[in-house]
Image (cartoon, helix red, strand yellow):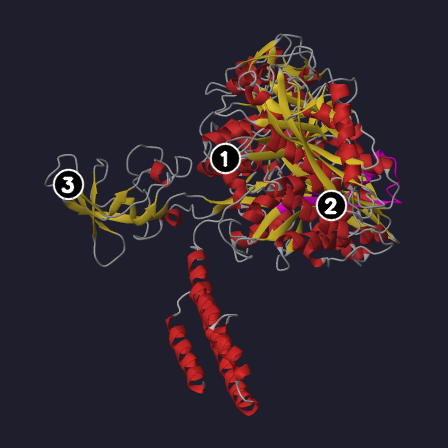
Amino acid sequence: MLEELLKIREEALKRLEEVESESDLSELNVSFLGRNGALTSILRTMSKLAPEERAKLGKEANEVKQFLAERFDFVRSAIEKKAEERRIKAETVDVTLPGTVDIPMGKLSPLTVVYRQIRDALIGLGFTTFEGPEIEYDDYNFTKLNLPLNHPARDMQDTFYINDKVLLRTHTSPCEARALMTLKPPFRVVIPGRVFRVDEPDASHSPVFMQMEGLVVDRNLTIADLKGTIDTFVKAVFGENVKSRLRPSYFPFTEPSAEVDISCTICGGKGCSSCKGTGWMEIMGCGITNPHEIENCGLDPNEWRAFAFGVGVDRVACLKYGINDIRLLYEGDARFLRQL
Amino acid sequence: MKLPLKWLKDFVEFNTTPEDFANRMLLRGFEVAEIIPEVKAKGVYVCTIEKIEQHPNAERLRVCEVNVGKDEPLTIVTNATNVYPGCQVPVALDGAVLADGMEIHPTKMRGVPSAGMFCGGAEIGITDAEYPGASNDSVLILNEDHENGQPIAEALGLDECIFDIELTPNRPDCQSIIGLAREAASALGQRMKEPVITPVEGEGNAEDYAKVTVLNPKLCPRYLARVVTDLKIEPSPRWMQLRLKLAGLRPINNIVDITNYVLLEYGHPMHAFDLACIEDAHIVVRNAIEGEIVTTLDGKERVMSSDMLLIADPKKGVGVAGVMGGLNSEITENTKVTLFESAVFLPDNIRHTTRKLRHSTDSSARFTKGVEAVNAEKAINRAIELVHMLGAGKVIGSMIDVTAEPPKERTATADIAHVNEILNTNLTGEQMAELLSGINIECKVDGGKLIVNVPHFRTDIETGIETDWDIAEEVGRLYGYDNIEPTLMVGRTFQGRLGRSFALEDEIKDRMAAMGFMELYNYNFTSPQEYDALLLPENDEKRQTVRLRNPFGEDQSLMRTTLIGGMLRTVQINCNKKTGASRFFEVGNVHFDNNDDLPEERKMLGAVCYGANESFFTLKGVLEQLFSSLGIEGVRFERGGGEYLHPGQKAVILINGDKVGEIGCIHPQVKRNFDLPVAPFIAEIDFNKLLCHVNSERKFKPLPKFPIVPRDIAIVVDENIDAQTVIDVIAAVKTKAMIGNVSCFDVFYPKFPGEKGIPEGKKSMAFRFELRSDDHTLNDEEIGLSVKAILKSLKFRLDADLRS
């Protein structure tokens, strides 16, 4: 009987080597280890044996059974592993094929992106958003800002008029007047919006563009505070390494007035064709609010001092992204929007 | 304003490079837009022609051997006929750039190599004003001995530059060489060499030769005149011509050139009349008669109106005050007696005149920015000094002076502490006085005050409330803004805040971008035709447009009342350019001319999509998601909307019964009108109305504890019944189980009567809804009862049958 047992063992091992698939394996499993399998049949006949012999043979048979079970498991896992490898191979894709999209790519305009950056930097400095109408009174756009009728500086801003008293605002500054007249000082406001000038569109001019005005009213403001405020948002928008400077200029609504230059974003200040070799690029105007404007808006200029700045969002966007034609911002060409 | 370095040197010791000077001026508020070399051409040198031979292969060419100061002579082939052996001429050598931008390189001409090219004045960029003979068409023969190989600019004494300076409107005094020299001197750390004018008193009595009457002293507060007889009209001397030319003016004759020279040097416009052409030699300054015509020097007839100031004689107009002289009294070569005018006119009036006549000149530009009485006198004295210096004529007597109000000394008082406060500086009054003195503003310190003696030319410095700020500006500029350290504001803390409307705009834009929409900023201008193209009826609100008084053209003459036109143009552009885009949105304002005050401004959200993957329902889905993300409930879409939309695919959008916008496919006719290859789907929503319905205080509702039972039913109903009607009926049914989330997921219209058992005039619709209970798991009986109740209600209210 022992021989028979060993024969079964040999036979099983031999058959195992020929197994190729999971189904071959389970078939084999049934024919050897199954309920009516060869090994089970032998074990069943053991009851006829003498007790000592039964114990000896039983031990032997169990070892064979154990051994074969382990072999079966081993072969099974090898087959499974092979099958998994085949599956993986079949599922392998060319990762360089293009990705698929359910929704096309949406984009915010660079104007929105830049506007938010500036605005959020200022909110961090305690500014609050404020807004006013695009179609505005001449009085707010000019007269209250120390630009009475026939003031030579009115020529600086070619204006679209609706009638003698109403116009398309040429800057966001009329909102300064609205803020000064309605808010209780001290306050800090940031005013974004579209503005309009009679400029035929070309690479650097657009009759519609976006401006942001900052206005701070308090008791002890200085031009050094103005410098610090501007430097903060210049760094927020253009990066920590970008420097800013103020240089004297003239605006009727500020005195002293200054232009803000930033170190050239192309060459980093060494001088290149974009900055005409100066290392600096002009981005905005600013100044201490003219006392006449404060007075025109009902506050006492000796009690309340203010400073203001107006930045062209378009200009900043063009500088920041290296856009060489401002008109692209208003054309809605998807190829342009996708890039930025 | 063009500032020739040559001229500047009359008043300033120029001890630096042009670039450094430009930078110093910039930091004082004077931006040098361009540094222009006196001679434009580069790489042109002096040479002597040693030998000239006929070209072997060309009759018109000659081969010259030239000495350019090197050991070896060069060969130049030329077609010039005026050159001769031994003459000195300019030659452009390899790498030269001529005045017109042309580059010169060695070449072969008919087989003979030529190292360069001889130049005439035009190629170098000069005329007779710079060098005699330079205006001729031929090669420029130099008439003095120069060193061969010397750069031509140096040889001609034209190796300096011209600064093109941008002026701010507050500094009319700097529209002059002297005004700029004052600032330049200070920028270079010097004091300007003050010009000294030698007064010229002539024989006789000017009043015997001419008379001046000012009838409107308000518009002409000062009129100064001098008479010069025995004129010799001839070209002005070369130095004067050269300076005029460098500063951008064309030399004419000695008398006119003198007025222009003074205009540039002192910034005060002058005029010279041929006194023989002035009736009774009597100048009358008066308002024009309405419709009176004056022919100005440029030969154009100017129709005057009664609010314009006219320079006239007793019979006729002889000039438009402050703008241009009359042709009838022009200085000609035959003029023997002249009257020089140096007057002050009211800026507003001259501005008005130039606007109305649509004509501005160098003179009017200065008058409109403001001239002043003291400078008027200096200017005319300088002109007479030049007449004398040039020997242009005989100066008669002294000044004819008609002055309504003599110029006054002005004193302003500034608070030193206040100036320091504005600038965050710590300067003493003496330090401020010293800085200001550098630009001829003299001050005294009196305790805490700075007593400023305002110079006559600084009309921009006020003697009132603005003084402290004016002085702070001057001190700050002279001290240097770079020397002021930036600080962050101190004092009480402010809470920075993004307003609700701004925050919502951010959120909407972000959502739209996330759903595949690209953001537009379209212009606000539109054409009247657009509203016809959109098929809008005459009484449509969108036709209440605001009209610009001075648009670029009729097609951009209106402010938009809708974002739709702009979005359709965007679609057109993107289709034409095949950009592959399909979704765009814009948040922008529209305006309605519907009240007497400012036009009504409405912020709108517009969205458009087009192409194979888009439909009414993709856009509707986008809006539904948007509303849902904003916590807006009670949204309904009902058939309806503007004429620009497809009659079968349009809806108004209602939120809690309030109409907030429209959605639909563009009407086929509108598609054709806008020349679109596809019919886009479009939606426009009133931003502020949307804002009203946003629920920003959303609260958490506990998640359901018991399972939700979804059920589908298919019903057969009248084909005119829309899904929303059925949904409303189902949602309104009250059963023990709660009914929610009702939606329609399929509609079937039979293609022929009776298809799939659906009778004529009917359609099949499939709905899904959810049944649930808050306190137990629903059993089959409850579910069955609910479905039964729903079907009963549908039958009763809509005559709908369960589809078998």
Kindly check if marks 3 and 2 are in contact, taking CB atoms under 8 A apart as contact: no
What residue sits right under mark 2 in the picture? A287
| Left or right position of B72 against A148 | left
Q: Are marks 1 and 3 on the same chain?
A: yes
Q: Residue visible at 51% across and 75% down?
A: A40
- Please state if B438 lies on the left or on the right of A187 as rendered: left
Q: Quadrant of residue B178?
A: top right
What residue is shown at x 46% (from left), y 74% (from top)?
A38
Label 1 and label 3: CA atoms lie apart by 41 Å
Q: Which residues are magenta?
A: A283-310
- Contact, CB < 8 Å: mark 1 with mark 3? no
Image height of B470 relative to A207, above or below: below
Category of crowding for the residue at label 3, using alpha-carbon neighbours closer than 10 angstroms: few (below 14), some (14–19), many (at least 20): few
Kindly state the secondary structure of the residue where label 3 is placed. loop
Mark 2 and mark 1, same subunit? Answer: no
Give the quarter of the figure containing the C terminus of chain B. top right
- Tag nearer the camera, 1 or 3: 3
- Name the residue carrying label 3: B110
Q: Which residue is mark 1?
A: B248
- The answer to whether residue B364 is seen in the rendering is no
Tell me which label, 1 or 3, sits earlier in the chain.
3
Judged by depth in the image, the label closer to the viewer, 3 or 2, is: 2
Badge 2 marks a residue whose secondary structure is strand
Name the residue type under label 2: Gly
Q: Which quarter of the picture shows residue A196?
A: top right
Q: In the image, is B136 to the left or to the right of A184?
A: left
Which chain is home to disc 1? B
